[in-house]
Image (tube, rainbow, N blue to C red):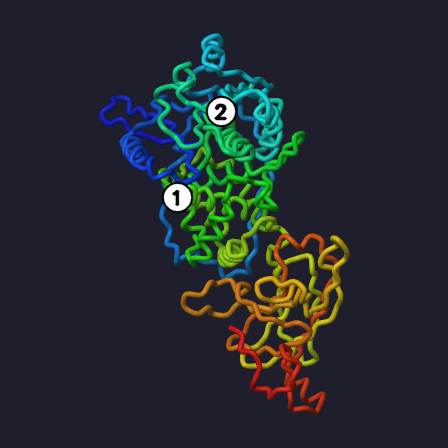
């Protein structure tokens, strides 16, 4: 989609650096017949088949580093070492909105003004206009194609808000776009220059973008907003960062909702039917099902040629969505746009170092996010609630579990080789459509989620050493609690609790569960009984038959 490449001109007496922009948009597999053509084209790209024009620079500064450069390799198995001090999320200073001047267009100067309108019309290409977009298309009148300029104009204040730009400074900022059903028409009409190489779906250069017609209205809009995000970042911010950030932010902002009147960008789709042709969530779920999910370090290492298939776009979107919507790390992520003009090789490394004290927790929650990925995933509500912990006293302890949040630390640490009795009580609402669904800790057996009754109380323990090959996130292998359950640990750890419900269903929950935690030996001495109750069956069993939680 958007790519800046730095080429050193060996032997140039002035040591000139030429900045070239090459954009590739590949979001779906090519038919088999197209493979030879694509292979030949990629070979040309590898030897410098790209736009030879310099990237735009503002009058008072220089673009010091290309936006798309390979990220410095970091060993996936050795994340930044956390500090021995108690972990706290990094504080990010609040800065005023940017006051950088609007950058002039790159590529073809004043492209829209030099177009021969009569010639264009003779080829059956019509022009649509709005305040910030001139759009040329050979699609027939009618339908939603006429809405695109209005959609684009509504994106401007949302880009400005996200990147902290003053909308008043974008007066006169305008893109020229081309939505092509028959690219040959645009080539013959002079709207598709010969130096714009083959691309699959969308291509951005300076203040112009080209889009091939798509089978769905949603994905056509998505491509326009994606390429528009590239143009905004390159011309307003002076760069776009390394590949994962550039493409991830473009995907993040272009994922949208449009009701015919109002555009909402940065929208987590709640249903597959809302985003036909997009498919990012399916890509991630397929990888997870195949037990091949990507780590954040792998995504950060994407190089300039990575985004020539759909999968890197999906993982870049996931990484951007995770950080952008997580309440603990959102501020640090959103401050990254101020670094896009710096060395791209240092961009990701600096970000990881900034978060090094949180990196173990980031890794755990990234695994939770990707393994539970689904439409409507609510990142803020599913963010793990962590609390300082204490040892469970002899008299027992209690916690209140809020049912409209995901996994929550109990605040209590369980000792190794000690049996604990967990008991729960409470009544809470799971849904209000078509009527209120009341639930208790045993869950609602009319509906199941991941093999357990919907709304059932679950438990997991953090701080234990995972077995070889296991994910480090303890919440991926919870145990059922229901009303009561005995738990014995091989290693000490912090008890976490949650109800069994998809992330998208948390927002309409009302109520809480009171969970009591007691040492079983204390319970025996109080009750004068030597038998324990197995919470999964309700039968009386010997104490040795308790659950050994890993």
Circle 1: is it few (<14), some (14-19), or many (20+) Cα within 10 Å?
many
Out of 386 and 139, give the one closest to the viewer: 139
Residue lying furthest left = 11
- Give the label, 1 or 2, closer to the camera: 2
Q: x%, y% of residue 200?
A: 40, 32
Q: x%, y% of residue 268?
A: 59, 44
Query: With respect to residue 420, does 125 lie above or below?
Result: above
Residue lying furthest top = 118
Task: State the separation of the CA atoms marked 1 and 2.
Answer: 29 Å
Out of 74 and 2, give the one closest to the viewer: 2
Q: Residue tagged by mark 1?
A: 302
Q: Residue at x 62, y 79 (%)?
A: 486
Left or right of 437 on screen, residue 42: left
First in residue order: circle 1 vs circle 2: 2
Q: Which mark is residue 94?
A: none
Q: Residue tagged by mark 2?
A: 179
Residue 527 sits in quarter = bottom right
Q: Residue at x 33, y 36 (%)?
A: 33
Quadrant in the picture for the N terminus? top left
């Amino acid at each position: 989609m958007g790519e800046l490449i730095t080429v050193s001109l060996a032997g140039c007496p002035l040591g000139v650096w030429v900045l070239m922009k090459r954009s590739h948009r590949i979001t779906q597999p090519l038919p088999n017949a197209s493979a030879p053509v694509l292979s030949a084209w990629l070979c040309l790209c590898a030897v410098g088949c790209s736009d030879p024009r310099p990237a735009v620079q503002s009058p008072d500064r220089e673009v010091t580093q290309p936006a798309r450069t390979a990220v410095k390799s970091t060993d996936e198995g050795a994340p930044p070492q956390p500090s021995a001090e108690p972990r706290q999320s990094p504080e990010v200073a609040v800065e005023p909105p940017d006051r950088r001047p609007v950058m002039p267009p790159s590529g073809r100067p004043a492209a829209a003004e030099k177009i021969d309108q009569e010639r264009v019309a003779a080829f059956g290409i019509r022009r649509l206009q709005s305040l910030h977009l001139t759009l040329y298309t050979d699609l027939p009148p009618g339908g939603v194609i006429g809405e695109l300029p209005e959609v684009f104009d509504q994106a401007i204040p949302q880009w400005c808000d996200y990147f902290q730009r003053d909308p008043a400074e974008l007066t006169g900022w305008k893109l020229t776009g081309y939505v092509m059903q028959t690219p040959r028409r645009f080539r013959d009409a002079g709207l598709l220059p010969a130096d714009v190489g083959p691309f699959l779906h969308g291509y951005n250069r300076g203040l112009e973008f080209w889009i091939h017609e798509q089978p769905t209205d949603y994905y056509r809009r998505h491509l326009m907003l994606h390429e528009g995000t590239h143009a905004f970042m390159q011309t307003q911010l002076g760069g776009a960062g390394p590949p994962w950030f550039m493409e991830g932010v473009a995907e993040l902002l272009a994922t949208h909702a449009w009701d015919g009147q109002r555009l909402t960008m940065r929208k987590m789709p709640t249903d597959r039917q809302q985003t036909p042709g997009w498919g990012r969530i399916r890509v991630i779920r397929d990888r997870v099902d195949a037990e091949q999910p990507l780590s954040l370090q792998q995504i950060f290492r994407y190089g300039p040629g990575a985004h020539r298939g759909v999968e890197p776009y999906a993982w870049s979107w996931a990484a951007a969505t995770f950080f952008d919507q997580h309440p603990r790390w959102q501020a640090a992520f959103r401050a990254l746009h101020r670094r896009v003009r710096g060395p791209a090789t240092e961009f990701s490394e600096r970000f990881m170092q900034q978060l090094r004290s949180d990196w173990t927790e980031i890794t755990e929650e990234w695994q939770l996010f990707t393994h539970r990925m689904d439409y409507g995933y609510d990142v803020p509500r599913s963010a793990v609630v962590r609390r300082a912990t204490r040892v469970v006293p002899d008299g027992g302890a209690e916690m209140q579990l809020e049912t409209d949040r995901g996994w929550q630390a109990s605040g209590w640490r369980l000792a190794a080789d000690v049996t604990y009795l967990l008991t729960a009580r409470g009544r809470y609402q799971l849904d209000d459509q078509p009527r209120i669904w009341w639930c208790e800790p045993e869950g609602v057996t009319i509906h199941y989620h991941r093999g357990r009754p919907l709304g059932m109380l679950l438990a997991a323990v953090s701080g234990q050493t995972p077995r070889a090959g296991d994910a480090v996130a303890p919440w991926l292998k919870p145990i059922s609690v229901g009303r009561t359950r005995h738990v014995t640990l091989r290693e000490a750890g912090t008890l976490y609790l949650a109800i069994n419900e998809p992330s998208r269903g948390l927002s309409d929950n009302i109520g809480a569960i009171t969970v009591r935690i007691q040492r079983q030996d204390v319970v025996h001495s109080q009750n004068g009984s030597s038998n324990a109750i197995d919470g999964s069956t309700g039968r009386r069993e010997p104490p040795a038959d308790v659950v050994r939680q890993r």
